[in-house]
Image (cartoon, rainbow, N blue to C red):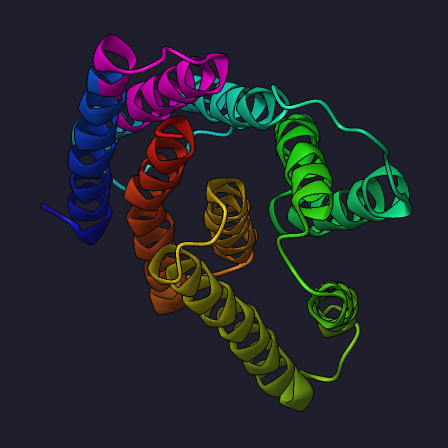
Amino acid sequence: MNEAVLMNLFQDVVLLAVFIGTLRQLIRGKRSLRMTFFAFAIASGLLSDLYWLTYDILRPETRMPFAANEIGEWAMFLLLGAALGTKPIKRSTILEKLFVPVFMAANVALWIAWSGEWIEDIITGAAMGYFIYHLAAQCKQEKAFHGWEWRLYGIACMALIAVQASIFFAPEPLRHPLDLFCYILMFSVSAFLFVRMLLSFRHADRPSVSVCRAFAVFAWTLIAMYMSADVFYTIAYVTVTVCFPFLLWALIKEESL
C-alpha cells in the first residue's frame, strides 16, 4: 500500500466521520440550509476520494488526465460556496469583485503551466473561485479579520503569485531558493490562520466569525496544496483533512444559537 493510498484512506475516514456528524446535526438540529449544503459538499468530497482510492488501488501511479473524481471536487467547492452564500451579502467590496477573480485566474495560469491540462484547471479554478468569493464576502461582512490582517493576506497572495511565476524564468541556481520561499510563505500564513481559528473557538467569538476563520484556513491550505509537491504536498493534504472537523464544529456552534 503506497503513501497516496494511505493519505486517501485517512481523508476518507475523516470525511465519513464529518458526514455522519453533519447528518446527526441535520436530524437533531435546526436543519438549516447552510448545514444541508455542507452535508452535500462533504458527500461530494467523500465520493471523489472513494473513486480516486479505487482507481489508485487498481492502477497505482498511473496518471489520468481527466477523471470523475474531479467532478466531485468541483461539486464540493460549489456546495461550500453555496453554504457560505446562504447568508445574504449586504455590500460587495473590491476584494470580492476584483481581487478574488484576479487571484484565482493567476492560480489557474500557474496550474496550466505546470500540468498543461487547460479544461480541468479552468473548471477547477472557476469552482474554487466561487467558493472563495463567498468566503471573502462573508469574512468582510462579519469582520472576521482586522484591517492589517487583510493587508497581510493581500501582500502574501501577490508575493506568492509573483514568485511562483518568476520561477519559470529564473536561472537554475535560483529556482530552489525561490521555491523554498513560496513554501515558507504558504505554510506560515496557513499556521497563522490556524492559530486565529483556534483562538476564535477558545475565546468564544461570535459563531459566524469562527465559521469564517475555519473556512479561511481550509481555503488557504487548499491553495497551498495545489501549489505543493512531495513532502510539502503531504503536509498540506493532511492539514486540509484536519480542517474538515473544524468546519463542522464551527457550523454547529453557529446553529446552536
User: Is residue 78 shown left or right of residue 221?
Assistant: right
- Residue 184 visible in the snapshot: yes
The correct choice, above or below, for 63 with respect to 204 in the image is above
Q: Is residue 257 magenta?
A: no
* Quadrant of the snapshot with the N terminus: top left
Q: Where is residue 204 in the image (x, y as percent from the top left)?
A: 40, 54
Q: Does the magenta stretch include residue 40?
A: yes
* Residue occupying the far bottom of the picture: 173
Q: Residue 142 appears in which quarter of the rendering?
A: top right
* Residue occupying the far front of the picture: 257
Q: Residue 12 appears in which quarter of the rendering?
A: top left
- How many labels were placed on the picture? 0
Q: Residue at x 84, y 46 (%)?
A: 102
Q: Which residue is drawn at 47% across and 26% down?
A: 73
User: Is residue 237 shown left or right of residue 66?
Assistant: left
Q: Where is residue 237 in the image (x, y as percent from the top left)?
A: 36, 52
Which residues make up the magenta segment?
25-51
Q: Where is residue 95 in the image (x, y as percent from the top left)?
A: 83, 47
Q: Position of residue 81 (x, y in %)?
A: 59, 26
In this view, the residue in front, 60 or 235, is 235
Q: Is the magenta stretch mostly helix, strand or loop?
A: helix
- Residue 59 visible in the snapshot: no
Q: Residue at x 86, y 35 (%)?
A: 92
Q: Which residue is drawn at 50% across and 44% down?
A: 215
* Residue occupying the far left of the picture: 1
User: Is residue 115 shown left or right of residue 199?
Assistant: right
The correct choice, above or below, for 15 with respect to 19 in the image is below
